[in-house]
């Protein structure tokens, strides 16, 4: 190596060259990438608090949330969000820490749920198997650990897309197995019902509120355990394999064994969450563990940042609250849709006069088109927006919605896709000019077909949010990206 001096480091972690200290590692703080402006300041302040105090604050916040007077629907959204968050934390072991693409992870979730259903219900009680929850849950977790080892065996020879295909086959095979094999045992499409509630120290978890608190405890315990693993030799070995498997092997790290451990620990977390989920639902069905659930888990992990325990949890909670709560309501989803458009315009359009001109042109275009359409035929503006409340009042005389809006909305959707493709290709003032009709057409499509079909719209919105996040911050909301410093 040459004798060039390293650039001066910044931050409190580095006091200068020291004997026995790797200076590249010592300059970790200067290579961290933070969010811009005030979010970055919040991120730095949170890091000064420490990981364990932040976990304690999060636990207290989660436990106090029902005190705010949540409705039954909101409490169920909270339960679903905690389930996906805990699953994302478990998936983070395999994907974020060890760097292996596992597309069959949801099968471990289903294995835990079905294992609890078989052991703690009357489904196979004729054979004398009807265990209390405190006996069945540990058995299910041990069996899941063994299953994780078996599923992880191909990872010794496969990686990347090939490993993803094999694990995806495992996930789909699990759904087919529970749906079509041994229907008398697994219930087939009808699933298994009348599951026992969880008993702990004489207390029965019977209400949604009790299962909410139990899931908070499970999530916090999983995060704490995985934090200890992350800072252990095993956690460092996972990260070494993720960054460079060949280099890790040359440093005497047992690569195959460490990979199998990642699959096993991830399976344990998923199975534990599956048992709580099954007990809370009082039934299990094959469709509860199909690909859409896997997509939500990955969406939360990608949004929050793979490799970060806090990121996986935060991302999953944000995705699920958005998906299962906000996007179910036409009014709330409308606020989210138009709010995201406005935030994107404010964040991207510079200088400020460009933003003002764009908004003014957008308002003028809407009123002009509405006036022309009304002058041609009253039926062209006879429809009403799907949104309600303030949004409907604003859009009523700005957006053209015909009486039969479904066909027009479908045609508008095709045209919107074409405009979005063109918007990506062009540059400069032409893009700003095209942006105005594109936003207007997006509002038209939203109010005619998207808002009226929440099952499809929820998936599209989550996909759009992820695309924006991956372009703006590829490492996720709280994920860390190493920034190389030239020497």
Image: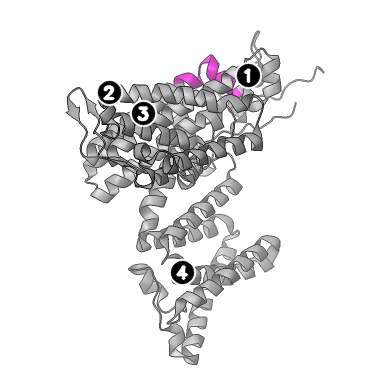
Distance from label 4 to label 1 (Cα)?
51 Å
Asked if marks 2 and 3 touch (Cβ < 8 Å), the reply is no
Q: Name the residue under label 2.
A: 134
| Label 4 crowd (10 A; few <14 / some 14-19 / many >=20) | many
Q: Residue furthest right?
A: 2
Q: What element carries label 2?
A: helix
Q: How crowded is mark 1: few (under 14 residues within 10 Å), some or many (20 or more)?
A: many
**Most distant residue in the left direction:** 202
Please tell me whether mark 4 or mark 2 is closer to you in this view. Answer: 2
Against 59, residue 324 (above or below) is: below
Magenta-colored span:
228-239
- Judge depth for marks 4 and 1 and give the one in front: 1
Residue corresponding to mark 1: 255
- Answer yes or no: is residue 344 visible: yes
| Residue 78 magenta | no
SS for tag 3?
Answer: helix
> Which disc number belongs to residue 220?
3
In the rendered image, which quarter contains the C terminus? Answer: top right
Q: Nearer the viewer, residue 187 or 248?
A: 187
- Between residues 300 and 292, which one lies in front from this camera angle? 292
Residue 253: image quadrant is top right
Residue displayed at 66% across by 18% down? 23
Q: How many labels does the image show?
A: 4
Disc number lying in front (2 or 1): 2
Indicate the secondary structure of the residue bearing disc 1.
helix
Residue at the spot of label 4: 449
Q: Earlier in the sequence, mark 2 or mark 3?
A: 2
Q: What whole-number distance in Å separates the C-alpha atoms at marks 2 and 1? A: 35 Å
* Location of residue 247 by image quarter: top right
Label 3 to label 1: alpha-carbon separation: 29 Å
Residue 142 x, y percent position in the rendering: 41, 21
């Amino acid at each position: 190596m040459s004798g060039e001096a390293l650039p001066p480091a910044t931050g409190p972690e580095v006091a200068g060259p020291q004997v026995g200290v790797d200076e590249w590692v010592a300059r970790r703080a200067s290579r961290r990438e933070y969010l811009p402006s005030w979010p970055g300041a919040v991120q730095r302040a949170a890091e000064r608090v420490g990981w364990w105090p932040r976990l304690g604050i999060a636990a207290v916040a989660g436990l106090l949330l029902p005190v705010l007077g949540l409705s039954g629907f909101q409490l169920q959204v909270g339960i679903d969000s905690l389930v996906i968050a805990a699953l994302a934390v478990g998936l983070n072991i395999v994907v974020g820490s060890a760097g292996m693409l596992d597309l069959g992870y949801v099968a471990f979730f289903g294995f835990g749920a079905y294992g609890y259903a078989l052991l703690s219900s009357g489904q196979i009680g004729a054979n004398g198997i009807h265990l209390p929850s405190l006996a069945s849950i540990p058995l299910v977790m041990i069996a899941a650990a063994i299953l994780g080892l078996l599923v992880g065996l191909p990872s010794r020879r496969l990686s990347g897309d090939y490993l993803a295909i094999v694990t995806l086959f495992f996930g789909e095979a699990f759904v087919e197995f529970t749906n079509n094999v041994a229907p008398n045992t697994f219930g087939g499409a009808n699933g298994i019902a009348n599951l026992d509630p969880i008993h702990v120290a004489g207390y029965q978890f019977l209400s949604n509120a009790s299962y909410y608190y139990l899931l908070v405890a499970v999530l916090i315990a999983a995060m704490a355990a995985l934090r200890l693993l992350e800072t252990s030799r095993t956690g460092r070995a996972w990260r070494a394999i993720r960054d460079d498997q060949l280099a890790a092997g040359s440093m005497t790290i047992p690569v195959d064994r460490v990979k199998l451990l990642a699959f096993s620990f991830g399976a344990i977390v998923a199975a534990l969450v599956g048992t709580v989920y099954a007990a809370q639902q009082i039934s299990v069905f094959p469709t509860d563990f199909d690909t859409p659930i896997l997509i939500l888990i990955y969406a939360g992990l990608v949004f929050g940042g793979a490799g970060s325990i806090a990121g996986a949890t935060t991302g999953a909670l944000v995705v699920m609250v958005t998906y299962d709560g906000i996007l179910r309501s036409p009014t709330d989803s409308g606020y989210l849709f138009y709010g995201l458009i406005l935030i994107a315009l404010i964040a991207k359009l510079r200088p400020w006069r460009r933003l003002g001109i764009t908004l003014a042109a957008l308002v003028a275009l809407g009123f002009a088109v509405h006036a022309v359409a009304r002058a041609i035929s009253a039926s062209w503006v006879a429809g009403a927006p799907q949104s309600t409340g303030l949004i409907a009042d604003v859009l009523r005389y700005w957006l053209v919605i015909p009486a039969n809006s479904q066909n027009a909305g479908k045609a508008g959707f095709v045209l919107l896709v074409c405009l979005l493709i063109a918007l990506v290709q062009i540059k400069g003032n032409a893009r700003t000019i095209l942006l105005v009709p594109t936003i207007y057409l997006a509002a038209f499509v939203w109010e005619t077909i998207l808002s009226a079909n929440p099952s499809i719209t929820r998936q599209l919105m989550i996909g759009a949010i992820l695309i924006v996040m991956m372009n703006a911050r590829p490492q996720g909301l709280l994920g860390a990206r190493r920034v190389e410093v030239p020497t």
